[in-house]
Amino acid sequence: MKSIKIKSLLLTAVAVFFFTTAMSAQSAGVTTTPAEDANYDKGFRLGFGIAPGYVFEDPYGFGLGADVRLQYDFSKRYSVTLTTGYTHLFGNEVDGVDVDDLGFIPVKAGFKAFWWEDQFYAMGEAGAGFAVTGDYDDTTAILSPSIGWANKYFDVSVRYEYYSDFPGYRNDAFRDGNHQIALRFAYGFRL
C-alpha cells in the first residue's frame, strides 16, 4: 500500500512538472499575441493512434493499444482532449501459473500545452479503464502524463500510465496498481 501511495505521489509530481514547464515556457516570451490567436483556426481535430507499451510489473509484460482522440484547439498552444480506444495487456506466467490477458477500454480527458515551436507538447490525462476480457471485471482510475511532438498530421508521444486497480505482482503477492510506459504513433486531421 505504501508503494502505491509513493507511486501516486511520484506520478502527481511528474504531471505537475510537465504542466509547470509548459506554463513557464509560455510566460518566458513564447506565447502568442492576441492577434495571432484571433487568426488561428480554432476547432476540432481527430486522431487515430497505436501504442505499444512496456508494463512494469507482473503479471503483464507487454501492452498494445489503439485509440481515437478528439481534440479541441483553443489556440495554437492550448487544447483539450478526449481519448478512448482499446488496450490489451498480455499476461505472463507467475509462480508457475499462466495469467490471463487483460483487455480494457480507456476513457480519458486531458489538457495539452505546446511550448516549443508549436510542435512539442506536454499533456496530462485522467479517466477510467473498463475491463472487457479475462477474469478481471473491475474498473480502474487512469492517470497519464505524456510528452510529444506533433505537426499538421502526425503525432508521436511517450506516455506513462498508472492503473490504480489493475493487479500488479510484487513482494510475492498480487496487489492493486500497475503501470506502463507506451510510445504512441498517430495520424490526425482537422474536422
Image: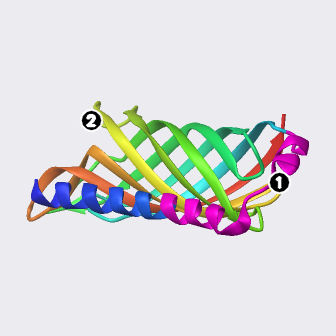
Q: Which residue is mark 1?
A: 153
Which residue is located at x 43 percent, y 57 percent?
15
Residue 49 appears left or right of 91: right
Q: Residues within 10 Å of mark 2 (few under 14, many from 20)?
A: few
> What's the residue at 63%, 54% (across, down)?
113
Is residue 96 visible in the rendered structure shown here? Answer: no
Q: Which residues are magenta?
A: 19-41
Disc 1 marks a residue whose amino acid type is Tyr
Res 3 → quadrant: bottom left
The residue tagged 2 is 135
- Please, what is the three-letter code of the amino acid marked with disc 2? Asp
Residue 167: x and y in percent read 23, 48
Q: Is residue 7 visible?
A: yes
- Say few, some or many: other residues with alpha carbon within 10 Å of mark 1 (under 14 / 14 to 19 / 20 or more): few
Residue 29 among magenta residues: yes
Please state the horizontal and vertical placement of residue 20, each as a whole percent of the image.
49, 61
Magenta residues, dominant SS class: helix
Measuring 71% from the left and 67% from the top, which residue is drawn there? 29
Q: Nearer the viewer, residue 119 or 84?
A: 119
